[in-house]
Amino acid sequence: MIIANPIYDVTFKRLLENDRAAKFLIGTILDCNVASLAPAVSERTKYDRNTGELTLFRKIKKDGTPVPEISEFTGLDAMEIEEM
């Protein structure tokens, strides 16, 4: 079993990407039932099961990188990128 250390920012962000895990964690901290979350996502992670590599992607469009290029690289669809 691998146990993530939530002290590390990337680990915490990865945990919060899962809606069910995020509701549980925030509900436990606040001692209440969390019905829904609406996070403003500016970063995504991608886990490669073959290499065990975890990559953090940040949405950066100020440099003129086109959305299709970002989509191809990250595996996210264009709508997800625009919503970030």
Image (cartoon, rainbow, N blue to C red):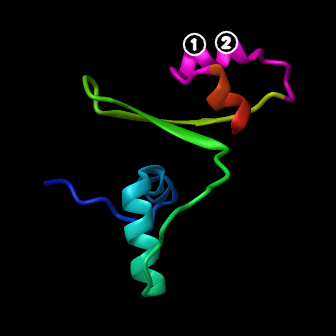
At mark 2, the secondary structure is helix
The residue where tag 1 is placed is 72
Above or below, comparing residue 67 to residue 83 in the picture: above
Question: Image quadrant for the C terminus?
Answer: top right
Q: Is residue 20 magenta?
A: no
Q: Amino acid type of disc 1?
A: Glu
Whether tag 2 and tag 1 are in contact, CB under 8 A, the answer is yes
**1 left or right, relative to 60:** left
Q: Position of residue 48 (x, y in %)?
A: 34, 27
Q: Is residue 63 magenta?
A: yes
User: Residue under circle 2?
Assistant: 69
Does residue 71 appear to the left or right of 31 in the view shown? right
4 or 80: which is nearer to us? 80
Q: How many marks?
A: 2
Q: For residue 74, which quarter of the picture?
A: top right
- The amino acid pointed to by label 2 is Glu
Picture quadrant of residue 61: top right
Eyeballing the image, is 16 above or below 68? below
Mark 2 Cα within 10 Å, few/some/many (few <14, many 20+)?
few
Q: CA distance from mark 2 to mark 1?
A: 5 Å
Task: State the residue lying farthest toward the left.
Answer: 1
* Residue at x 35%, y 64% (from the top left corner): 5
Q: Determine the secondary structure under disc 1.
A: helix
Please give the range of residues in magenta. Answer: 62-77
Q: Does residue 32 sit above or below 26 in this rendering?
A: below
The residue at the far bottom in this view is 31
Q: The N terminus lies in which quarter of the figure?
A: bottom left
The residue located at (73%, 30%) in the rendering is 82
Left or right, residue 65 beside residue 34 = right
